[in-house]
Image: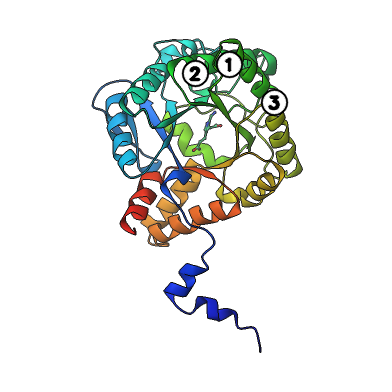
Amino acid sequence: MIRRNRILRKSASVRSLVNETTLQPTDFILPLFIMDGQNKKEEISSMPDFFRYSLDLAIEELKTCYTLGLRCTLLFVKVPDELKDNGGKEALNENGLMQQSIRAIKKALPGMVVMTDVALDPYSSFGHDGIVEENEIINDKTVEVLAKISVSHAKAGADFVAPSDMMDGRILAIRQALEKEGLHNTGIMSYAAKYASCFYGPFRDALDSAPGFGDKKTYQMNPANRLEAIKEAEMDVEEGADIIMVKPAHAYLDIIREVKNSVHIPVSAYHVSGEYSMIKAAAKAGYLNEEQAMVEVLTAIKRAGADLIATYFTKRILELINKSK
Ligand code: PBG
């Protein structure tokens, strides 16, 4: 034997020298669920240790995470049923919860990069990501609304809008709408390869946004497909996306790698609600060590090619990174 691979694993110090993937605070995006009210914090029952906050407490949480090194948040809002309709009118309200949140967060923490979810589902009486006519999700009319929502978020101060709807042509429409309004510095993080996944279940509980009829398979991708993800990513780059996202992450590591190899812009991955809750549940049952599972999965997502990772473990991993410094 002249090649002994175990030499590079013989001690913690040697292993640290040849370690290929290191997690750092700026790798992470904290998804935040914001609700109406004051001084409110509610645990999401299907996402243990993850909370919905009123805006005041959301800002406190962001300040804590900022001191741990966090520089990016992705905002979602919970919309009361009485404000929901088919066209997502409330999404365009200049003083809506999303717009207020963007302004307040940028004021409190100017260094925090604010990304906003752009989609109709939290605002839709049908719980779908598009306008519904005769049980169909209508593409082009939806894209028009998404472009308006994006302009509204950008005017409130969002650094990036993040369309998560999977309609065709929306990246180009959004870029053009932003340009037309002189919003040249607002970026687009496109959920380019978003699969029709069962792992979004807990998120839909959190925002009360489950589809009222049918499923999302006419717009979100078939989990069996790989080439289609590359096509989606490449098209979104051509249309003007600044960052591409693959979602979910844990079950789609191959897709993250292929997309990373195909495009020349940063790639993000969304470690989604069900992927988080799965680890929490297994740890609670005593089947897994939660911290080890978290670190292993997040490292795997980065190793697969993710430049940025949105995860509900963000605060926990930031605490761990800070502790180990
Ligand atoms: C909706 C949206 C979803 C998620 C992010 N944006 C749910 C869906 O498409 O039904 C899922 C996030 C998660 O599960 O953590 N546009």
Q: Is mark 1 on a helix, strand or loop?
A: helix
Please tell me the numbered disc located at residue 239.
Answer: 3
The front one of 57 and 217 is 57
| Residue 288 percent across, percent down from the top left | 42, 62
Left or right: residue 179 versus residue 51 is right
Is there CB contact under 8 Å for labels 1 and 2? Answer: yes
Q: Which colour scheme is used?
A: rainbow
The front one of 264 and 51 is 264
Q: Which quarter shows the C terminus?
A: bottom left
Position of residue 103 relative to residue 200, above or below, is above
Q: Is mark 3 within 8 Å of ligand 1?
A: no
Left or right: residue 225 versus residue 150 is right
As drawn, the residue found furthest toward the left would be 39
Label 3 sits on what residue type? Glu
Pointer 3 or 2: first along the chain: 2
Residue at position x 29%, y 39% in the image: 64
User: Residue 190 lies in what quarter of the image?
Assistant: top right
Q: What element carries label 2?
A: helix
User: Mark 3, residues whose alpha carbon is within 10 Å: few (<14), some, or many (≥20)?
Assistant: some
Residue identified by numbered label 1? 178
Pointer 3 or 1: first along the chain: 1
User: Real-space Cα distance between discs 3 and 1?
Assistant: 13 Å
Pointer 1 or 2: first along the chain: 2
The front one of 281 and 9 is 9
Is there CB contact under 8 Å for labels 3 and 2? Answer: no
Position of residue 202 relative to residue 129, above or below, is below
| Residue 235 percent across, percent down from the top left | 73, 31
User: How many numbered tags mark residues here?
Assistant: 3
User: Mark 1, residues whose alpha carbon is within 10 Å: few (<14), some, or many (≥20)?
Assistant: many
Label 2 sits on what residue type? Ala
Residue identified by numbered label 2? 154
Residue at position x 49%, y 18% in the image: 154
